[in-house]
């Protein structure tokens, strides 16, 4: 609703209901009924400027078998407060976006099918900053880029219920205040293309990610240390370069992409339960044609 010129307000509410019945003796039924809300205030001083303050929350009940417990635990809930701005430059051909946000998650669910704990953390929070650019700098030069800075911390450790004994176990309180698992402090990507003439186009870019820690925050065991200092398994930071050359014709397009130009060994993903890592793709050539 535009309540005064150049100012708009958004209000929304949503109700979700989930009822599930199982033959399992440890969890015969699950019942969730939750409300979610969204609100925002926007200011448009000009058509190419947009400033906003927004709040939204959501919930995600999980009913997979490995999540079933004798006493159903609360649904995962998240809320985000975001202050941001958007600008259009170069006659609308280039867009910029910047945002500060705080994201809080309660009863963070475990997505690991092999885990015996359904809750990872009871509460975690991420404070972050995002900057994005996308569009055309000139008629021949396009760019897409994004930077994210994140400070993710565990505020409360998990509480889990043993399906057999009904005993409530909690994670080691030593994890409180530590960086959340598998969360880098920064990510960055840049991809740009340049049209040499009416047929040929070249492109290149880089993807970078900070180091990520691998540990099990729901574990009651001692926190990982090295020489008496907190030191979990860590996948190192990395940056990877990609390149592209394309020939574009009215009737067809042929494109050659090279991923990981310098054939760098890096770790793309972290598996927390045991601290395993998954290597990223080594140098790869991909030839495609479109008609």
Image (cartoon, rainbow, N blue to C red):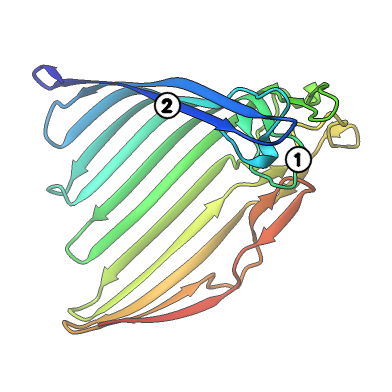
Image location of residue 179, percent across then percent down: 67, 32
Quarter of the image where the N terminus is located: top left
Residue drawn at (15%, 47%) of the image: 92
Q: Which mark is residue 82?
A: none
Residue 104 visible in the displayed image: no
Q: In which quadrant of the rendered view does residue 252 lie? A: bottom left
The residue most toward the left is 5
In this rendered view, identify the residue nearer to me: 271 or 116: 116
Quarter holding the C terminus is bottom left
Residue 30 seen from this side: yes
Seen as rendered, the residue at the extreme front is 23
The residue that appears at 18% across and 33% down in the rendered structure is: 49
Residue drawn at (54%, 70%) of the image: 260
- The number of numbered discs placed on residues in the rendered structure image is 2
Q: Compared with residue 254, is residue 38 higher up or lower down, i.e. above or below?
A: above
Q: CA distance from mark 2 to mark 1?
A: 33 Å
Residue beneath label 2, please?
Answer: 16
Report if the CB atoms under discs 2 and 1 are less than 8 Å apart: no
Secondary element type, mark 2: strand
| x and y percentages locating residue 192 in the rendered image | 34, 62
- Which one is earlier in the sequence, the residue at label 2 or at label 1? 2
For image coordinates 18% across by 52% down, the residue present is: 93
Q: Is residue 279 left or right of residue 231?
A: left
- Using the image, tell me which numbered label, if any, was put on residue 215: 1
């Amino acid at each position: 609703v535009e309540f005064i010129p150049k100012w708009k307000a958004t209000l929304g509410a949503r109700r979700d209901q989930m009822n599930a019945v199982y033959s399992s003796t440890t969890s015969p039924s699950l019942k969730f009924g939750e409300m979610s809300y969204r609100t925002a205030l926007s200011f448009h001083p000009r058509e190419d400027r947009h400033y906003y303050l927004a709040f939204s929350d959501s919930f995600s009940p999980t009913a997979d078998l490995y999540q079933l417990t004798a006493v159903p635990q609360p649904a995962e809930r998240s809320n985000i407060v975001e202050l941001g701005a958007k600008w259009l430059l170069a006659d609308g051909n280039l867009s910029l976006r910047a945002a500060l946000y705080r994201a809080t998650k309660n009863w963070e669910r475990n997505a690991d099918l092999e885990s015996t704990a359904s809750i990872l953390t009871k509460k975690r929070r991420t404070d972050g900053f995002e900057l994005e650019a996308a569009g055309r700098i000139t008629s021949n030069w396009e760019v897409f880029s994004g930077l994210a800075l994140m400070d993710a911390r565990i505020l409360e450790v998990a509480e889990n219920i043993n399906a057999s004994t009904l005993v409530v176990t909690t994670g080691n309180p030593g994890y409180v205040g530590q960086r959340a698992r598998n969360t880098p402090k920064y990510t960055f990507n840049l991809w740009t293309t340049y049209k040499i003439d009416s047929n040929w186009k070249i492109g290149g870019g880089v993807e970078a990610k900070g180091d990520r820690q691998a540990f099990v925050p729901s574990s009651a065991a001692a926190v990982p240390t090295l020489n008496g200092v907190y030191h979990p398994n860590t996948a190192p930071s990395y940056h990877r370069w990609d390149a592209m050359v394309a020939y574009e014709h009215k009737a067809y397009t042929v494109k050659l992409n090279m991923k990981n130009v310098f054939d760098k060994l890096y770790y793309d993903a972290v598996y927390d339960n045991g601290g395993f890592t998954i290597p990223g793709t080594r140098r790869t050539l991909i030839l495609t044609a479109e008609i």
